[in-house]
Image (cartoon, rainbow, N blue to C red):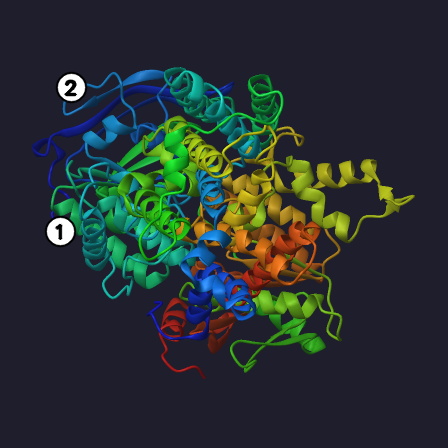
Amino acid sequence: MGATSSSAERGALIRLEGIGKTFGRVRALADVDFTFMRGECVGIAGHNGAGKSTLMAVLAGVYAPTQGSIEVDGRAAPHYDANAARDAGVRCVFQELSLCANLTVAENMTIVHPHLRGRGWRRKATALMRDKLEEIFPGNGLKGSELVSDLTLTQKQMVEIARGFTVTDAPVRLVILDEPTSSLDAHTADQLLAFVRRAAESGIACLLITHMLGEIERVADRVMVMRDGGIVGVLPREQSSRASIIQAMGQHLEAERTPAAARALEARSDAHAFRWHVGAKKHTSIEASRGEIVGFAGLAGQGQTEALLSIYDAATSHRAGRVKVAFVAGDRGRDGVFPVWSIAQNLDVRWLLGGAKRRRGLVDLAAARDVVEGWRAKIGIRGASMNAGILSLSGGNQQKVLFARALASDADLILMDDPTRGVDVGTKRDIYRLVHDEAAKGRTFIWYTTENEELSHCDRTYVFRSAAVTRVLNADECTEEALLAASFEEHAA
Amino acid sequence: MTPARNTLPAMQARLRALLPAISLVAVLVPILVMQPAVMSYFGSSLLLNLAVPIVLATLAQLAIITVNDLDLSIGSFVSLVACIGATLLVKTPWLGALALAGCVLAYAAVGALIELRQIPSIVVTLGLSFVWSGLAIVLLPSPGGTSPGWLGTAMSYQTPFIAAPIVWSVIIAIVGHLLLMRSSAGVRIRGAGGNPRAMRRFGWSLVRSKATLYGIAGVFGVLSGLSLLGLTTSADANLALRYTLLSIAAVILGGGEFIGGRVSVIGAVLGAITLTLAASFLAFLNISADWQVGMQGAILIVVLSLRVLLQRGERQ
């Protein structure tokens, strides 16, 4: 793969020297020195809030650094803004997608390419976009004339990534991929990683920021590990194993895994308390008992979210089978947070609906404060005041608040729609612990996840394919191979 | 993953795009049945006489809705322009032209200000509506004035075969569509309404896009005021106050949405014509003109309900 060729012969592309960035009194980056070489693939790992996204925004020219200097091709670039970054060949694929939903796929090209203008720009943009999509994700089936708002999350991410690699006037030399696979399924993620390797070989440097350490392990020539706004280590390819990355991040490997199988046996004694029929013709039945953690698996977008939503509808309907239910959204920005509300208001809103006792018809503010303080300690949000806006928290912490929102309520059934998307390992472990604790208290969880490792926490796993369940795996049968086999099964059982 | 098939959702999406045209037909057909003479050159020219200024005011509003703002001052602005046209433009043409250019620049400046200071457009334009009205009253304390000769000639120009208001509306719709929906600059400007954060990240100035759109709104407002003056031949400070809500209704009727930068120029023009016709519709039914506003509201409710239903169908 030529991945180990020495970096000296490639030459420096962009050099960061002593970069620091502060927002008000919050220090997001401190003293970052790094040199990006031509045609290398750098993996970047770190907790949420470690400064990865800020560093990338500086590199993309979105934020001007408060300290330090940037050099492009060995020359100082004092006014490094978005246009300078574009001229230097830096492209960024952002974690929160930066597509305009009201434009078509091809029209979205004009935003990154100022030179797409004049007669025939639309045809040119469509051709560029389709070629790139076909190159990265063969068989994607997109035509370029679709409105972005009509696409699925996976397709949007594919478009966003493909757009980052398209070339008009300025050559592409460095592409920053911020959590590019968070909404992709295993198959498309695979296509992307293979493409990243090919791109690196043809001289395009790639920066891969991801919480999927396996992906870094697979493609990165070097791994930059960040913590608290600084670089704590740069690992060469030979040392970039999962274990050593996690060690550098200052976290421990997940050693203890709850023996889910053992718990499942005792849970199964009380027969299945819940039973739903979901899917196209209500053919698929989902069962769960009290205190059970049920997993939904399969490739992304195979009807898992729809199944969760129809369970939610059934649970909130006025017919028999009504259960107290809470939902943890996966798409935080769209379905999860109330962006202008404070952390506390975001946390206790579900509690107000069920669980809160009213005082003379009004909200009991003291009780609300207790709930918020109690959960703040449990989910471990430090530093921020609970009256601060929810957006002042990092993505992972926002997700924790959404978890607390569901758990602070009186719900017996918690539905989770890929809740750990783009969340760091530490936060994930906190979330797993919470789920296990609450399940032990008799709450039932239905958990859709795109990360197969998380299914080891589930007592039973339904594997989806084309909006139907192909297999039901008990905890002891739930291996990577079995999951993959079931995910790619063509005919639903 | 989503091959274009003739599925129900795809059909509903197409139906939703056609909704402005369908609602126009739904209003037009009963009128034609009751009064076939409407089809004639003079009939249609009479019926759609006032459509041109409304269409232009609608496009001014559309420019502002594109960036997720709302202009509550367009009605009084159009009145002010008509007053300038009926006084300054007749007496001292160069001063009148200067005043109109100043109005457009003021609009652009307001757009820049709204983006720079992040103030809600509704507050600013509501305040401005009183400023425009005040200026109009200063210029023309009581209804009167005359329209410049060339303006009257232009507005009463007889186009061959098809009545002038229809020709003007079609031309305006096509030009607007090409500029805002098809050109790359127009697409970028709409992008500012769809995802302002992304635009800023990629180095585009939101201040510039907003100022441009507000400036365009000013230009359309000026054109609307002048065309109205050409039709009425005299002006009044309260001449076009109802255009404010009418233009918003027309944009929404034409498939536009308040947020997200989703607008349609052709739809908005159709919407404006539909609302103009709705007024005449009542006259044909021998119902008092007092019910006009109620009728326009009813059309709006029906069309928006249909849109929601179709949208829901698409999701399922």
Give the residue type at disc 1: Met
With A280 as the anchor, is A452 left or right in this view?
A: left
Q: Is residue B201 among the parts visible in the rendering?
A: yes
Q: Which mark is residue A131?
A: none
Q: Looking at this view, name the residue that lies furthest to the right.
A: A360
* Camera-nearest label, 1 or 2: 2
Find residue A7 and report its horizontal and vertical position in percent.
13, 34
Does B41 appear above or below A393? below
Q: Which mark is residue A75?
A: 2
Q: Which mark is residue A1?
A: 1
With B29 as the anchor, is A210 left or right in this view?
A: left
Q: Secondary structure at mark 1?
A: loop
Find residue B65 and report its horizontal and vertical position in percent.
49, 40
* Closest to the observer, A231 or B113: B113
* Closest to the observer, B37 or A335: B37
Q: Secondary structure at mark 2?
A: strand
Does B146 appear above or below A417? above
Find residue A290 and report its horizontal and vertical position in percent.
69, 68
Give the residue type at disc 2: Arg
* Closest to the observer, A45 or B119: B119
Snapshot quadrant of residue B157 = top left
